Each structure stands twice: as structure tokens, then as C-alpha cells.
Image (cartoon, rainbow, N blue to C red):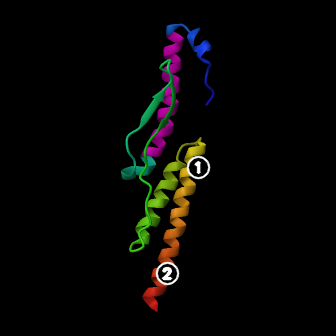
């Protein structure tokens, strides 16, 4: 996002400053809501961070990253797919969103390996 400098914000009249706050909040909230909606029960509450001038500058929503369950790799795969979908849900995923998606894909790959090994053990 492109943000105004503190000096530029200080030069805004109160009406323009309130409009900027509303605009930034709406943009950030929509981004975080896309994550939350896609993550479903794996998501926590939306947090919006503001700068010292009270302007919303970023946000986040915690999403529970799955851990590898060797006994039930299907569950891990399902949860990892949800996390990837949630991380990439906004139309403008951030670098952090891309990192979360990559981490979930790595966990999914481990679960797929465990799934394959479990299948081999079953048929041995």
C-alpha cells in the first residue's frame, strides 16, 4: 500500500484525515476478511494496526497452521489446503501471505509423503 508521510498527514484537515482513516481501514479490513472467511474455523480474530497518527497501516488474522499428523495425514492435507486457500484469498496477497502459503504447501508435501508411506505399510 502507498502511505502518506507523517508530515503530509499532519497537513490534512480533520475531514480529509477521517476519510483517509475510513479508506485505509476498509481496504485493510477487506483483505483480512478474505483470509478469515477462507480459513473458517482455523482463523482467529482480525487485528488492524494503526500508526501514531491513528491511520490504519496493516492488519493480520491468525490462522492455525496444521502440524504433521502421521496417523492421519489426510487431515493434515485438508487443513494445509485450507491454509493455502486462506493465505491467497485476497486479490493482493502480501509477501507474508505468500510465505504462509509456502509453509502450508511444505507441510502438505510432508503429509502426502506420510500418506504414501502409510499406504505402503498397509499393503506390505
Which stretch did the figure color magenta?
A: 15-36
Q: Evaluate if marks 1 and 2 touch, with contact meaning CB atoms under 8 Å apart.
A: no
User: Image point 54% across, 57% down: which residue?
Assistant: 103
Residue farthest toward the front in the current orientation of the protein: 52
Task: Locate residue 82, reporting x and y percent.
Answer: 46, 56
Instruction: Check the picture and name the quadrant holding the N terminus.
Output: top right
User: Image point 43% across, 50% down: which residue?
Assistant: 39
Task: Locate residue 88, reporting x and y percent.
Answer: 55, 49
Residue topped by disc 2: 117
Residue topped by disc 1: 98
Task: Locate residue 112, reporting x and y percent.
Answer: 51, 72
Question: Label 2: few (<14), some or many (≥20) within 10 Å?
Answer: few
Residue 117 lies left or right of residue 45; in this view the side is: right
Which secondary structure lies at badge 1?
A: helix
Residue 20 lies left or right of residue 41; in this view the side is: right
Q: Is residue 90 above or below residue 82?
A: above
Q: Is residue 73 above or below residue 3?
A: below
Q: In this orientation, which residue lies closer to the viewer: 34 or 7?
A: 7
Marks 1 and 2, how far apart in space? 29 Å
Number of numbered markers:
2
Q: Does the magenta run of residues contain 31?
A: yes
Residue farthest toward the bottom in the current orientation of the protein: 124
Amino acid at each position: 500500500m502507498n502511505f502518506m508521510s507523517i508530515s503530509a498527514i499532519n497537513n490534512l484537515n480533520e475531514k480529509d484525515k477521517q476519510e483517509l482513516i475510513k479508506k485505509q481501514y476498509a481496504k485493510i479490513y477487506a483483505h483480512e476478511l478474505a483470509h478469515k472467511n477462507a480459513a473458517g474455523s482455523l482463523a482467529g480474530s482480525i487485528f488492524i494496526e494503526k500508526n501514531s497518527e491513528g491511520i490504519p497501516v496493516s492488519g493480520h488474522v491468525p490462522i492455525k497452521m496444521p502440524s504433521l499428523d502421521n496417523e492421519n495425514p489426510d487431515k493434515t492435507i485438508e487443513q494445509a489446503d485450507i491454509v493455502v486457500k486462506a493465505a491467497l484469498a485476497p486479490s493482493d496477497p502480501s509477501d507474508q501471505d505468500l510465505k504462509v502459503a509456502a509453509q502450508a504447501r511444505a507441510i502438505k508435501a510432508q503429509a502426502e509423503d506420510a500418506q504414501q508411506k502409510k499406504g505402503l505399510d498397509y499393503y506390505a
